[in-house]
């Protein structure tokens, strides 16, 4: 695929390795060295991953636990840099990684909204203009002025999601954001994400739920132990992961609801 | 189709580029709004839940001056004229430097939640720590100036230059060291403790609680040159030149300050600037590993 003005993300052979340290203190390291045990290990969390994404595509990123999804999003986000290979993006990016944005636990929700907006590159006036909308959408009531550290995981996910959808970003990364939201909020989020998708932003959606990926995405990437194992059609991707047969069983408790929309909402 | 493309404020299409912030300290000063937020937040955090709030930044130095006045000036009087002013002037520089160094070193770990998930120039945090410390210099300087006037001080333009030079020197040096140690502290938290010890040395390695004249008296002219290789000693002497020196009579001034004070200060500033560039270079080298090591 050639790179044009409408290319949103280009990843070329990105590899990212982490060092696992088994011992931390000097004493532990010394003991381990004496016994001939390994002190640390390096492994590739991402290995030679390449893809190209056009503006407006919505990508479902799937894979088992530890396959490197969050790591890939952090690289797209610019938080981490690949060890080799290159990654280029176009426009502003907002990422909710592992259910929440980068919030400062000691700051109130209000201050965190302003800080995150500033990190995204929004000006003071822009933030002020959107502030009420963000707060309304998050709908966390009087918690807004208490430290985010005391929020429940659902509450901080709400706030993060709300900042993310209202910030004028061109690429929106959502990593299991809906996993901790309650049912009404999930439904609201899915609707909002569809709006985002339809507005032409690039959407990167990480989820273990086949149903919501099917509803949200038009392309699926599957990671397996850091390798890009599949890139293509949504249904084939889900089949590739063998998520298609299981998803119905996992849905069992809500199976009695006929409304298809409801069913998808529960499957997130 | 074009309406779906990302657009910049000027209407053009933004370029395809690496999402990681790359301009380092330059970018920090390009993004002044974000920097201002971080600094303001830090200041608010320090005084949150306090009734007097910012007034404390006046009360603290004032109480310190009173202690110096009675203990060092009256009780331990060694014959240095206006010794309390001498100590207080030195303390301003030492505090500013130590605070920058200390808070800057810890800044990366303290902001780990943001650093782990949001892309922003990470130099932002040590620089913000420096600016917070700088913010507290103002009330201290104000008190120092008032005290000096009370001691019959006659200000001179060279004094103003001396203060600016001293603060610049401590600022460059403190920021450079904070950059280096903040990264080191991410990898081994021991470095925060190391900094604690280093800042203790700073307190006694500068002519603050003893006058420079003693150094020259004990070490002699040549050896005290080595003493003056310490850039913070220069910074402290410059502030003393600007303030305390002006409260002395002409006879008292003899031998209290080394020669070539301004020239040495200027050279030190140049060296500190080069050091800051070096620190930024080292920081750049290791910063890619910061987010994954902040657990
Ligand atoms: N900072 C780190 N240091 C060392 N290893 C790490 C670090 N971050 C992630 N890893 C490892 O990299 C691998 C990929 O992690 P990642 O978080 O990307 O997985 P994931 O696909 O998001 O999984 P999940 O579905 O559970 O969210 C895992 O084996 C993880 O243990
Ligand atoms: Mg993950």
Image: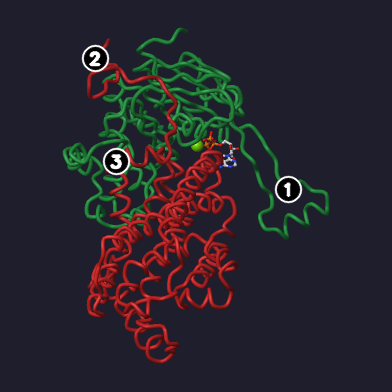
Chain colours: A green, B red
Q: Quadrant of residue B149?
A: bottom left
How far apart marks 2 and 1 lie (CA) works out to 54 Å
Sequence-wise, which precedes: disc 1 or disc 3?
1
Residue at (36%, 68%) from the top-left corner? B241
Give the residue number, with chain letter if any, for mark 1.
A39
Residue under mark 3: which chain is it in?
A
Q: Nearer the viewer, residue B145 or A74?
A: B145
Per the image, label 3 sits on a secondary structure element best described as: helix
Give the residue number, with chain letter if any, for mark 3.
A118
Residue at (34%, 18%) from the top-left corner? A56
Up-down relation of residue B256 to residue B171 (above or below): below
How far apart marks 3 and 2 lie (CA) works out to 25 Å
How far apart marks 1 and 3 lie (CA) works out to 41 Å
* Image coords of residue A44 (percent x, y): 63, 32
Up-down relation of residue B162 to residue A33 (above or below): below
User: Taking B38 as reference, is A214 left or right?
Assistant: right
* Image coords of residue A13 (percent x, y): 57, 20
Residue at (47%, 26%) from the top-left corner? A61
């Amino acid at each position: 695929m050639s790179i044009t003005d409408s290319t949103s993300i280009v990843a070329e052979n990105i590899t990212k390795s982490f060092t696992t340290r088994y011992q931390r203190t000097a004493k532990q390291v010394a003991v381990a060295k004496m016994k001939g045990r390994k002190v640390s290990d390096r492994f590739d969390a991402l290995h030679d991953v390449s893809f190209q994404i056009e503006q407006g595509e919505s990508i479902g990123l799937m894979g088992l636990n530890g396959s490197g999804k969050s790591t890939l999003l952090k690289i797209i986000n610019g938080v981490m840099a690949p060890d080799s290979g290159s990654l280029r993006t176009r426009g502003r990016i907002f990422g909710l990684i592992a259910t929440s944005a980068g919030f400062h636990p000691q700051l109130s929700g209000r201050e965190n909204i302003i800080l995150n907006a500033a990190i995204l590159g929004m000006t003071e006036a822009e933030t002020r203009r959107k502030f009420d909308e963000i707060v309304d959408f998050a709908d966390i009531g009087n918690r807004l002025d208490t430290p985010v550290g005391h929020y429940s995981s659902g509450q901080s996910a709400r706030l993060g999601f709300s900042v993310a959808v209202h910030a004028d970003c061109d690429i929106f990364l959502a990593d299991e954001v809906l996993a901790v939201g309650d049912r009404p909020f999930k439904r609201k989020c899915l609707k909002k994400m569809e709006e985002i998708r339809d507005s032409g932003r690039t959407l990167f959606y990480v989820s273990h739920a086949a149903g919501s990926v099917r509803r949200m995405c038009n392309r699926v990437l599957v990671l397996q132990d850091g390798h890009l194992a599949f890139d293509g059609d949504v249904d084939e991707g889900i089949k590739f992961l063998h998520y298609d047969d299981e998803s119905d069983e996992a849905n069992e408790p809500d199976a009695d609801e006929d409304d298809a929309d409801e069913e998808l909402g529960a499957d997130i | 189709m074009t309406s779906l493309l990302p657009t910049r404020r000027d209407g053009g299409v933004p370029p395809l580029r690496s999402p990681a912030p790359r301009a380092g300290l330059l970018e920090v000063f390009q993004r002044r709004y974000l920097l201002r937020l971080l600094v303001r937040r830090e200041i608010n955090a320090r005084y949150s839940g306090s009734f007097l709030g910012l007034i404390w930044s006046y009360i603290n130095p004032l109480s310190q001056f009173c202690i110096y006045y009675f203990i060092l000036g009256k009780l331990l009087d060694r014959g240095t004229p206006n010794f309390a002013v001498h100590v207080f002037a030195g303390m301003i520089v030492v505090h500013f430097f130590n605070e920058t160094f200390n808070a800057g070193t810890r800044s990366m770990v303290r902001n780990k939640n943001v650093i782990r998930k949001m892309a922003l120039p990470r130099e932002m945090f040590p620089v913000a720590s420096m600016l917070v410390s700088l913010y507290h210099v103002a009330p201290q300087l104000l008190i120092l100036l008032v005290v000096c006037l009370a001691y019959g001080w006659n200000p001179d333009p060279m004094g103003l230059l001396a203060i600016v030079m001293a603060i610049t020197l401590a600022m460059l040096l403190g920021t450079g060291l904070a950059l280096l140690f903040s990264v080191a502290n991410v990898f081994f938290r021991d470095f925060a403790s190391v900094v604690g010890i280093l800042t203790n040395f700073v307190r006694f390695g500068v002519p603050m609680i003893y006058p420079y004249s003693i150094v020259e008296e004990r070490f002699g002219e040549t050896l005290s040159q080595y003493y003056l290789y310490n850039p913070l000693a220069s910074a402290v002497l410059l502030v003393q030149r600007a303030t305390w020196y002006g409260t002395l009579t002409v006879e008292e001034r003899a031998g209290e300050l080394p020669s070539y004070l301004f020239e040495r200060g200027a050279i030190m500033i140049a060296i500190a600037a080069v050091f800051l560039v070096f620190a930024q270079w080292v920081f750049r080298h290791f910063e890619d590993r910061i987010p994954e090591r902040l657990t």
